[in-house]
Amino acid sequence: MKKTILSALGILAFSAISLSQTQTTQIDPTNVREGESVEYCKTHKKKQELLLNPAAVASFAQDEVIRQQEEANGVPVPKGTVYYIPTVFHVLHNGGIENISDEQIMDALSILNRDYRLLNADANNVNAAFQGLPADVEIEFRMATIAPNGACFNGITRTQSALSNDGSSGTAQVQAIINGNDVYNGQFPGDEYMNIFICGDIDGAAGYTYTPSNWIGTSMANGIWVLHNYVGSIGTSSTFTSRTLTHEAGHWLNLEHPWGGNNNPGNASSCSTDDGVSDTPNTIGVTSCNQNEATCGPLANVENYMDYSYCSKMFTPGQVTRARNAITSGVGGRSNLITSGNLAATGATGSVYLCSAEFEADRTTICAGNTINFDDQSFNAVNGWTWTFTGGTPATSTSENPSVTYNTPGLYTVTLNSTDGTNNDTETKTSYIRVLPAAASIPFYEGFESYSTLNNIEPWEVINPAGNAWQLHTGTGHTGNKCAKIVNFGQTAGNFDDLISSPIDLSSINSTTGMTMSFRYSYVQRYSSNSEVLKVYVTPNCGENWAPRKTLSGTQLSPTAQNSAWTPTSQADWTTVHMTNITSAYWTDQMRARFEFKSDGGNNIYLDDINIYAGAPSDVIVADVAENGFDIEALSVFPNPTEEDLNIRFTLKSADQANLIVQDVTGKITQSATINATEGSNLVLMNTADLASGMYFLNVQIGGSQKTIQFVVK
């Protein structure tokens, strides 16, 4: 299904970049625009890293010779001809604000085309010395709509990876996109698409790219990196940061900074260097909007897109010639992008039609009675929608973005048929909506003993974007023979894994009773340098909003390191955590708890004995556990701890046979008995003198119901 492999040249070139970068980003304050905290552009610094390789130096020199020969001997680049460039925006995110919206990306594309076609109104208000100089580049950027494997898409890919926020290696970020994006897991070649990589960090810069070069080649990494809050003018960005792509696309089209080929604006020595364009006056470069800058003699064109000012608004005719020479040159494969064959192959011909129905929901897991908002994302043209919502109200809709209420627990399918009036397409997502079961009452206890898997069971939701998920572990636990576990030993650093409960009814809690949430975990570090994190979040409204209530990280999570896969062997290997900070804002009938683990290349982690109850913290599991039903009422044991006799009290709604089973912490049955219980209150005396000291579980089974309670023998 996938095609295109990274060229050997591209791999070699960008390996050099990767080796030269470090995890710690040092910000050069001389390369920062006034009022900002990132280096505005690192294009020339990235090029200098490449030039550490003598072969790269020779290649770049030859590239310039080839380009000059093409310009001198080829057909002059015609004016009045608009060149179209197939463009793909690759969003690399880790679930944060860097996962910007399609609307923000389309706003960025609109600004890019506005600036390159001289449609920006502010071009009419340039400094008087440059009136009449702003020029139309006659280059437009069109969203590609066909991926390299022929799949239809909307010109945007999305990839979730922790590398979004680690910009030390642009190569690694591109590889993460190649491996994990949601459209096509392979190369988007640089001579077929202009690739724009949107990230949470790009080595401390707002943007960078590479000028056309055969050394870099035509690989996917021959693209533009840009920080998410420098994309467009809406969403996480602003008008102040909206022209970064205009600047970086200029570099991609072989334009230099007006002070020359470096990232050092404001240096008087720049007066002796130049950008190779005759109608851009020599300048030291500015990081503000100083309209009077004239250190080099002539008045500087600070409003030029290739300077660092925040009032940039123009390209000059000389820059237009240089950019158009670049896009029609074979260097770096630029000229292939604009061919009619490539425009057709990438779906950038300008004709718009429906090629795929697509949709998303604002959330896919809800409590019964909650409402979900659906968002049509069909592309690339649509004017009609037919929705089907199994289990929802309404069951059908013809709205573009309907809202649907689900009242009954279960898994439900959603179908959308979209049309542009001629073409139709249908998207069906099976078991897409999960409506959770009714809220569990308190005291709530989870020991994972009754499950055979944690995958797709009613009480728990497992979220696993990448890596190893929470899973059921059999063979050990703090209590009983089972627990939840992440096989974290050997897992890639930066993965996030969630285990989320169904709703729990805390509405009976009040300021007099108070409440506690307790749990036990077992973990050791793999290396003393590991900084793995276990966080506990709670929500009062079934998951609409989450708040962290407990964070354990690094040596706080465990001060011990073991360079082999960790498995607890005794209760001494477990840590008990009591949380008393779940305040009244969360005392609702839709409270849920979420356990999130962030990996850092460390060791396995285990979770057991999740207990939520009224009152102060208790090291003994509080009250009963409802496993299958609620016919057994008021189950209690006393004294607890006990030395000999254990009194077992329970109430039945009707007479029935009761099976009483005692198990030790390994799950072994140590005692059992069957009695004929009566309607109402029952008291059973059980002798525990023959039991060794330790923790035990009494399981009472009556009809189709069972309840378990913990007790201790001294």
Image (tube, helix red, strand yellow):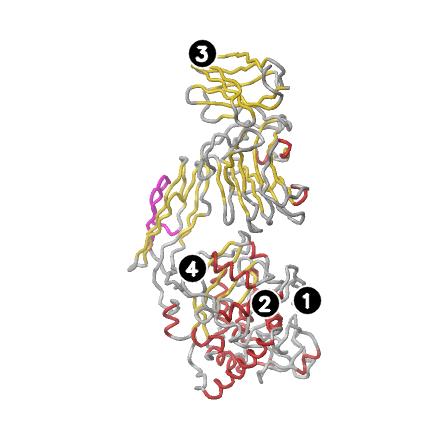
**What's the distance in space between the residues labelled 1 and 3, CA to CA?**
81 Å
> Foreground mark, 1 or 4?
4
* Image position of 148 with respect to 683: above or below: below
Identify the residue position indicated by label 1 in the image: 28
Badge 2: how crowded within 10 Å, few (<14), some, or many (20+)?
Answer: many
**Front position in the image: 648 or 394:** 648
Q: CA distance from mark 3 to mark 4?
A: 64 Å
Q: Which mark is residue 184?
A: 4
Magenta residues, as a range? 384-400
Q: Vertically, is 31 above or below 436?
A: below
How far separated are the C-alphas under marks 2 and 1? Answer: 19 Å
Q: Which residue is mark 3?
A: 676
| Residue 347 lies in the magenta stretch | no
Q: Earlier in the sequence, mark 3 or mark 4?
A: 4
Q: Circles 1 and 3: CB distance less than 8 Å?
A: no
Dot in front, 2 or 1 = 2
